[in-house]
Amino acid sequence: MAALELAAAGCKRHPPVTRPASVAVVPPAPAAPIPAAAPVDRPRRIKRVVIISEDGLRPDALMNVLPPVHAEIMKHAAFSLQARTIRRASTLPSHAAMLSGFDVKQHGLYWNSWKPERGYIQVPTIFDAAEQSGMGAAAFVGKKKLEHIAHPGSVDVFSRSGYFCKKVVEEASQYLVDKRPQIEFIHFSDPDDLGHSDGWMSNAQLEAVRHTDRCLRTLLDATAAAGLDRDTLFIISADHGGHGHNHSGKIKEDRLIPWIAWGPGVRAGHRIVSPISTVDTAATTLWALGYPPTPGAIGRPVLEAFDPETIAASGPSRTGTLKGFLKPPAKSSDEQSSSSLTRSPPTSF
Ligand SMILES: [Zn+2]
């Protein structure tokens, strides 16, 4: 029975991990199954959000390879293969949008390298929300430049233990289990690196997708063993795609990204039809944890990913004590008026 039917019938339990027959998405995975998002007693409660960004991962690369861990997750997740990053489809600007809910003109990180003299992102981020409420946030990345997104003090840990995902995920998994931050961001460089060197959709790049799949298993095995999968929302996405040996954002292959949500209260095996922008990742994270939306942000929670009961039990009214905890976005001299803050239309490629 589909999740929505169970909800409508007043079912008290999280639905079994079946999906509507009309939503055929992925073939059975050959690997040992990973645990499905665990049922939780209502009110359903997402206590933490873990965002995994697979740098440069095109949705069609993911589906071409369909590595076993991703495939198994997607059976139990709500997902879109048509999500899009911002027009400035480079690693630092895109991740800044993903983690703040603002486009580049507002968040201010328009460059794509580590330039410490330029300071930090000019708008609040999801890290600020967690840290200012005393819940803790952490980031484990493969690229130093992403530190521009973490205001000093907004994360308890910002670590770049290695470039490729193996070392990053080992450290990220250990920290997640030990410290249990409310928000943890994990960044895998592998698909982007092999895309630049060997070309997007090349055999080498597709092998990098398999590599990140193994890194993802490391994370999920650790969280399952610690029981964290019961109350953790995982969002798996990317900062951009690519074509040839690069990515500019001019064409859809650069801008299409996967967006996968998995955890308690998420609709299992649901292909999301509503448009998703990478800025919605920040908004969804804040919403799922009960924070109010960031003033001025253009991201919106991807409510279609969640079952009706979770939607009813979530949102800022659930906590209601954090109003005003975020400072408004900083004004810059060349900042455009707020009327220019619009989500890109689906046909803007
Ligand atoms: Zn990137």
Image (cartoon, grey):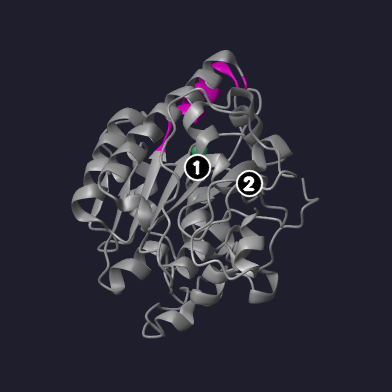
| Magenta stretch: includes residue 145 | no
Q: Residue 291: horizontal and vertical position, in percent?
A: 43, 74
Task: Locate the C terminus and report the quarter of the image it occupies.
Answer: top right
Mark 2 or mark 1, which is nearer the start of the sequence? 2
The residue pinned by badge 2 equals: 19
Q: Is residue 78 visible?
A: yes
Depth order, front residue of 191/251: 191
Identify the residue at image location x=32%, y=44%: 224
Disc marking residue 91: 1
Which mark lies nearer to you, 1 or 2? 2
Residue furthest to the left in view is 178
**Kind of element beneath mark 2:** loop
Our reading of the magenta stretch's main secondary structure is helix
The answer to which image quadrant residue 43 occupies is bottom left
**Residue type of the residue flagged with mark 2:** Arg
**Residue type beneath disc 1:** Thr
The residue sitting at 59% across, 45% down in the picture is: 18
Crowd rating for badge 1 (residues with CA inside 10 Å; few <14, some 14–19, many 20+): many
Is the residue at mark 1 in contact range of ligand 1, meaning its CB lies under 8 Å from it?
yes
The CA span between labels 1 and 2 is 34 Å
Residue 297 position, x and y percent, is 56, 70
Identify which residue, 262 or 279, lies in the foreground: 262
**Where does the magenta region start and end?**
188-201
- Pointer 2 residue Cβ closer than 8 Å to ligand 1: no
SS category of the residue bearing label 1: helix
Asked whether 108 or 23 is in front, the reply is: 23
Residue 347 relative to residue 65: left or right:
right
**Whole-percent x and y of residue 305?**
60, 58
